[in-house]
Amino acid sequence: MTCEKKPSLSRLTRSIRYALLASATTTFSALPAYAQEQQARDAVLPAVEVTGQQETATSPVQGYRATRAATATKTDTPLAETPQSVTVVTRDQMTDQGATNLQDALTYAAGVRSDAYGVDSRNDAFTIRGATPTTYVDGMRQTNGYYTSSVRPDPFTLERIEVLRGPSAMMYGQGSTGGVVNLVSKRPQETFQGEVGVQLGTFGRKQLQADVTGPLSEDGKWLYRLVAVARDSDTQVDFVGDDRFLLAPSLTWKPSDRTTLTFQASHQRDRTGSTAQFLPWAGMVTPNVSGQIPSSRFIGEPTDRYDTDRTTVGYLLEHKFNEQWMVRQNMRYARNKVDYVTHYADSFATDPSTGQPGGWAIDPVNQRLIRRIAGAQLDHTRITTIDQHLQGNLQTGNVKHTVLAGLDYTDYQLDSARGSGSNTIDVYAPVYGNPVSMTLVNQPRNTQKQTGVYLQDQMKFGEKWIAVLGVRHDRVTNGLAGSADNKDSATTGRLGLMYLMDNGWSPYVSYSESFTPLTGTDRLGTRYKPLEGEQIEAGVKYMPADGKSQFTAAIWKIKEKNQQTNDPVNPLFRIQVDSTKNKGLELEWRAAVTPTFDAIAHYNYLDLDDKLTGIPKHQAAAWGKWKLNVGDVSGLSFGAGVRYMSSFKDGIAPTTPSVTLLDTMLSWDNGQWRYALNINNLTDKLYNAACLLRGDCWYGARRTAVASATYRF
């Protein structure tokens, strides 16, 4: 039986829709007169020659302080005029901090818990405002499935990372209540430049990487870029590698100064396993008669694997009709293959002596022998995403409008085969060579089709007041082979108001909603319900015109339904909880304190609903980079960072202790060559990133050191 849920509009959503329609009607009716006035002005104004490249929402940024972003509005908008919390992690910051994965790159971003599940070679697990965000690449969703059908992005392919905190369904339809992490790819540049580099590091890390870009034709109408990575590496867990081969070519065609078409492609082949062992409380954070479980302990089989292959093709098109109107269309087709075989600890079984998980159910006295759950899955996912919108830059009276009207479409398909079993192993003296024999059983094909239409108006009243109104309607069809389609629809809205002060301060308030259709089923085969939420946020930004410093402060409250959390019975699945409420405070500061000293700092306070996985209430981090001159040697830099996470509990689980970690960097840059040494967790502190209610704990990353040499031309 097909059941369609009819749209249910809140009063605010209706008000936003009516206001937008009224605004659009007024704006469009005023267009002819305004266009004539603009043409007259263009006819008399002299041509101005512009030298240098002005920063855009996708261009390279020098230093740590971007001034513009597009993730919050899908338009190139100054951060100082965006009434919602946004953090931009620049290419320079990723390079200085030696980010080798997405979790590393987000370590110093406000509102983010970057190591939510410690070291996990399968997935970049991080949370924003207590919820798992949705990851996008160039404004299009990376994947729709659970993390065990995904591929880890490589930071070397990125120009920047934009973190939009809070619900964002009005723009994307598919964005969690926590927010959106948008990965902005490196794109072809007009000037020839390139670099090749080598990395050597702990756990046998050996990596080669290259990035070359420039004009392909003398007239500059064709530009190219090629990014490549090849890596052979182990991890801190025995028998788990971290090998990668990646190619990401792109080609830009600019037939005129009004049209830009960029073709993108990538192929990424990862060969790794699972560093996640799901080890029990006793031996991780509580006493075990056999002692502490080593952080390198592997209780799987050397033949275990998490092998992924991802291939993508797509394009980014922008055409300007005139000074007022432009159209964009972005499209990507992605195909993922994940071959996953694992054996992990059954820390979820109830210990008969305590009646709780997290112990040694089959060996409560010696606490050595543990049951291993074995799982195998072969996933093939295909996702086609297309997003197109029309943008108008208009004016009615003293009100400047940036109007956006768009439609996006996503077609997702998952074919999966799964198998399972179990046996036992001695955690403290593992003997390998006894894998569980598993037979893969084909699962029903899972599909999702989503269509969304949206309308947004960014209005600037004079030079002081900014208002953002947006409304969106989505229709989603979830299909499961052998069952009737499940249809959902929702209308979501957003409202923001900001005041621009002369001294660089900009107070704001905003309201936003989320609607995230979820694919897949839980352990019992029940389809997941859409995740819905709403947020109220108030804050202030300080972004003076000189660009030397940036400060943001925000308080927020989120209500949501159907949030996913870990299944206490089987961690390969998720369960949903009915209603949750979160609130918090975020502070972030970025500044060029002196010409030779740059700094980043943030503090997060999170009051999380008890129904969700435990997350620390307090987090803080600070990073500084000093440029040094020693004698006649210039180009030296020293970086240092500190990260703090408070203790926390997840229900009846033992307390996850607080931890303070240190990071360092030393580099020498003479213009053509750059040599660097990055060390994270300098003191090699052994710590738990999380101990969960269901019974397991996760080690955080041990000390990692990476020495790199880069030649630029």
Image (cartoon, rainbow, N blue to C red):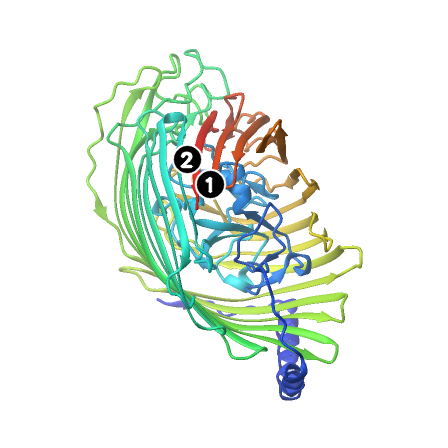
Out of 314 and 518, give the one closest to the viewer.
314
Do we see residue 187 in this rendering? yes
For residue 318, above or below residue 623:
below
Left or right of residue 484: residue 350? right
- Label 2 sits on a secondary structure element that is loop
Left or right of residue 587: residue 213? left
Q: Residue 411: x percent and y percent?
A: 36, 63
Out of 50 and 401, give the one closest to the viewer.
50
| Residues tagged 2 and 1 counted as in contact (Cβ below 8 A) | yes
Residue found at the very far right of the displayed protein: 502
Q: Report the amino acid beneath label 1.
A: Ala
Give the distance between the C-alpha atoms of the residues marked 2 and 1, in whole angstroms: 8 Å
Disc nearer the start of the sequence (2/1): 2
Q: Splitting the image into 4 quarters, where does residue 335 fall?
A: bottom left
For residue 669, above or below residue 30:
above
For disc 2, the marked residue is 120
How crowded pointer 2 is (Cα within 10 Å; few <14, some 14-19, many 20+) is rated as many
User: From the image, which quarter does the N terminus lie in?
Assistant: bottom left
